[in-house]
Image (cartoon, rainbow, N blue to C red):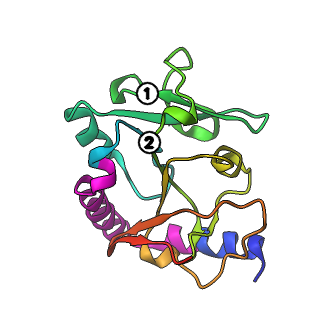
């Protein structure tokens, strides 16, 4: 399969996963992240608000907020640019692609200020390779990014090879309902 076929196959697979199992697995993933030293030590964490059948990070975001941790969420623009803004759950609004995001007037946080990124995707491999939705938003933001990166997925979203291209930046860690794994380099 090529990248487009992998994307279609794994999007369909993820959408077909039992909703109750997805909820339970999301809880397991959030619990693993809450106990992760990387997150505990981070001052600013980039995350995402779940869309469709993605891993639901809302319990983690709620925990970060309770702990007074700073987290940022992306705002994506039609010109291919993605910008992280400081987020508070009660002020999120629906943006492009139906994704909940911070208001555009909220503080912009540049990647250099972000200690680590939790990155969504459609399919991943054990080397940290990732296929997203095909718009390249994360590929562009990860170029030159110096903090830690962690792909967030269900174990069912893992495959042997995502056929990474030279411009693809591998993620350092992967987290699924089994736990957190260092990417094999």
Q: Which circle marks residue 92 in the picture?
A: 1
**Residue 84, image quadrant:** top right
Left or right position of 45 against 185: left
Q: Earlier in the sequence, mark 2 or mark 1?
A: 1
Location of mark 2 (residue):
115
Left or right position of 29 against 100: left
Say what secondary structure mark 1 lies in: loop
**Residue 59 makes an appearance in the image:** no
Which mark is in front, 2 or 1? 2
Residue at 24% from the left image edge and 59% from the top image edge = 31
Magenta residues: mostly which secondary structure? helix
The reply to whether callout 2 and callout 1 are in contact (CB within 8 Å) is no
Seen from the viewer's position, the closer of residues 137 and 49 is 137
Seen from the viewer's position, the closer of residues 115 and 93 is 115
Q: Which residues are magenta?
A: 12-39
Name, please, the residue furthest toward the top.
Answer: 105
Membership of 180 in magenta stretch: no
Membership of 19 in magenta stretch: yes
Seen from the viewer's position, the closer of residues 54 and 167 is 167
């Amino acid at each position: 399969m090529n990248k487009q076929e992998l994307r279609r196959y794994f999007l369909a697979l993820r959408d077909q996963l039992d909703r109750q199992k997805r909820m339970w697995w999301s809880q397991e993933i959030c619990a693993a992240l809450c106990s992760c030293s990387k997150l505990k030590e981070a001052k600013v964490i980039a995350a995402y608000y779940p869309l469709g059948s993605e891993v639901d990070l809302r319990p983690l975001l709620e925990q970060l907020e309770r702990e007074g941790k700073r987290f940022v969420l992306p705002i994506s623009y039609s010109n291919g640019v993605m910008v992280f803004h400081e987020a508070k759950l009660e002020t999120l609004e629906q943006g492009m692609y139906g994704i909940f995001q911070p208001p555009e007037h909220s503080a912009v946080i540049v990647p250099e200020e972000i200690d680590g990124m939790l990155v969504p995707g459609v399919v991943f491999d054990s080397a940290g390779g990732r296929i997203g939705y095909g718009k390249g938003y994360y590929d562009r933001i990860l170029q030159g990014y110096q903090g830690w990166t962690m792909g967030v997925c269900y174990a069912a979203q893992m495959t042997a090879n995502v056929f990474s291209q030279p411009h693809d930046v591998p993620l350092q860690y992967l987290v699924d309902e089994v736990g957190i794994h260092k990417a094999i380099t």
